[in-house]
Image (spheres, rainbow, N blue to C red):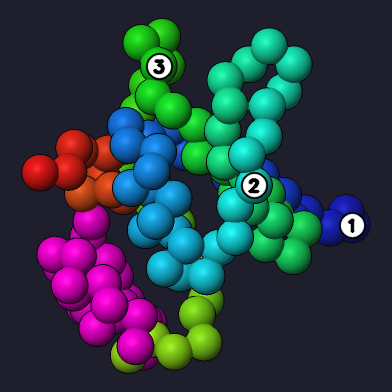
Amino acid sequence: MSVVCLNLVVLRVQDMARSEEFYSLLGLSFVRHRHGAGPEHLSADLDGTIFELYPQSQDAPLSIGTRIGFCVSDVDALLATLSQWGMVVATPSHSLPGVNVLSSPILMGTKWS
């Protein structure tokens, strides 16, 4: 039996600076990157899983409806910080105990006001 692992996540976002700021709050550390003549984008290495943010382009769909889970060292401190950003935190009935779900304009692909 082969082992399967996730090694790449790519999101297309409307506001690169705001997205970088948001994901940096979670502890991601980005570097600017470019593949050949492609667009400059942000890349973070999460222990072998590459997480990339690409600028939205006219010919590619926005990453709407994508759900991503991150493990963080201090959930309470992160939630306090994110509440200042206007995040809505919910714990739906189908969640695992102790798991919070964030609903964010940046995660949903909408523009920031």
In this view of the protein, which residue sits in the foreground, 61 or 16? 16
* 79 magenta-colored: yes
Q: CA distance from mark 1 to mark 3?
A: 39 Å
Image: 55 above or below 25 = above
Residue at 57% over, 20% down = 39
Position of 41 relative to 95 (above/below): above
Q: Residue at 38%, 43% (x, y): give it.
A: 17
Spot occupied by residue 9 in the image (x, y as percentages of width and height): 58, 45
Which numbered marker is on residue 31? Answer: 2
Indicate the amino acid at tag 3. Answer: Ser
Q: Label 1 amino acid?
A: Met
Residue density around tag 1, few if under 14, some if 14–19, many if 20 or more, within 10 Å = few
The residue under label 1 is 1
Spatial separation of the CA atoms under disc 3 and disc 2? 20 Å
Q: What kind of element bears circle 3?
A: loop
Amino acid at dot 2: Val
Q: Position of residue 100 (x, y in %)?
A: 31, 78
**Which residue is label 3 attached to?**
57
Give the residues drawn in magenta, as a range: 77-104
